[in-house]
Image: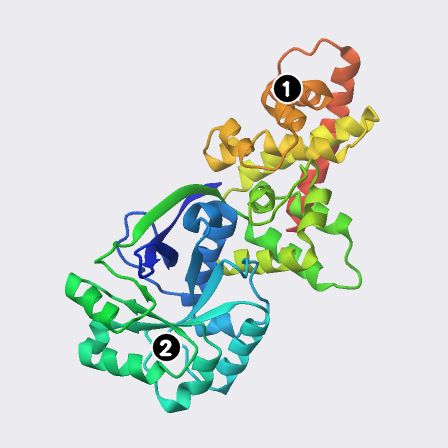
Amino acid sequence: MYHNVALARQPIVDNSLSTFGYELLYRRDVRANNADVYDQVGATAQVITACLLDLGLHNIVGTGKAFVNFPRGYLVNPSGVPLPKDHTVIEVLEDAGFDAVLLASLRRWHNAGFKIALDDFVFEPKLAPFVEIAEYIKLDMLALGKEAFHQQVEALRPYNVKIIAEKIETWEDYHFAKLLEVDYYQGYFFEKPQALSKKASNVNQMTLLQLMASLMKANDMSIAELENIVGQDIGLVHKLLKYLNSPLMGLVASVDSLRLAIMLIGTEQLKSITNLLLMSEMTADREVLQAQVLLRAKHAELFAQSQQYANQERYFLAGMLSMIDVCVGVNLEDILSELPLPLEFTGAILERSGRVGYTLDLIEAYEKNRPIKSEEDMKTLAQTYAEAVKWVEGFRAAV
């Protein structure tokens, strides 16, 4: 139920050689030295997913800019991305096809507040409308050669754009670009791309399809319906909670229910995240473990209902998160420390404190056939377990 996510970053430095930002590069795994891209749209989706939901954009770029390669298929997609506009620069690849459709799409991104960079660009007068909406132009010194590079810099001077000299491999390359007074530099002379990797939870594709279908029903959609769908996949719950806990979200409150998490994210952002995960093709064969997680979560919720405990939705989330270490392959305490949970809720899961912790203890004891002191608890556990099994079977049959 987990896999390793990887990407690489290469710094972009200014004239004082301070890091201004990083270009983020797709990697199939941490050992890969190049992108090896078969599907540009899927690769971009995986880079964005890693930034937002796995590695954390703040851990990758700090306060700098994230330059993300966007192929044409992503640029003309009207769904948008849940990236922070003040930290993200959209890099338009050289093979994007500079036509009227692309220009209209870039204007939409620009009007939405995103900065645009034209990658491996070669200026021609007919491309002036693209330059006019760009913030950055990246010129490849290795591909152009010094003479053509110089010509490109001079041709772009009338425009209000910042020039990034890329593929700077030697001191001579850097000195030449510096004499031309370009704004930023990138290349092996400064640093090779650095690979980053982390274990990440998988998300079931059928759950994502169900969620997207519900999100498309703008008039008939309810938070309860979304909560029901999201709550069926522990990987999705984990990613949404990590997204909420990102410094970029600026969350000041803790979250102890799926309903509150969904309300804080909002349906439009949830739609963007769902679309992103679908495109990144994050699927895995994990039906048995998924059923176990759902069974524990539902069993805890039904037991809380039988006891008429307050805040019964807490028990479903607690049951689910109590098994997240098995799903993600990381220590439970480390995982929970990354999520925006109340301290007493974390304590209930880790130390089995309070009513939620007591319920989790009972549920786990019943699962493992350990002795349960109260005959009344045992009777209720058996009844609610049967109801939970029936619920899980119904869910699996539906998907």
Q: Secondary structure at mark 1?
A: loop
User: Mark 1 = which residue?
Assistant: 352
Residue 120, quarter of picture? bottom left
Residue 149: assigned label:
none
Amino acid on which the number 2 mark rests in the picture: Asp
Q: Give the residue at x 24% y 78%.
A: 149
Residue 234, quarter of picture? top right
Mark 2 and mark 1 in contact (Cβ < 8 Å)? no
Percent coordinates x, y for residue 199 in the rendering: 43, 40
Q: Is residue 163 above or below residue 278?
A: below
Q: Give the residue at x 57% y 41%.
A: 238
Residue at the right extreme, as displayed: 308
User: Quick one: label 1 or label 2, which is nearer the N terminus?
Assistant: 2
Mark 2 neighbour density, 10 Å: few (under 14) some (14–19) many (20 or more): few
Q: Is residue 287 visible?
A: yes
Percent coordinates x, y for residue 75 in the rendering: 50, 72
Residue 161, quarter of picture? bottom left
Decide which of 331, 172 is in the foreground and name it. 172
Q: Is residue 170 visible?
A: no
Residue at the top extreme, as displayed: 373
Q: Secondary structure at mark 2?
A: loop
Q: Give the residue at x 31% y 61%.
A: 15
Amino acid on which the number 1 mark rests in the picture: Arg
Decide which of 53, 390 is in the foreground and name it. 53
Q: Is residue 386 left or right of residue 153?
A: right
Q: In this figure, which colouring scheme has been used for the structure?
A: rainbow
All told, the count of numbered labels is: 2
Q: Give the residue at x 77% y 48%.
A: 224
User: Mark 2 = which residue?
Assistant: 95
Percent coordinates x, y for residue 353 in the rendering: 66, 18
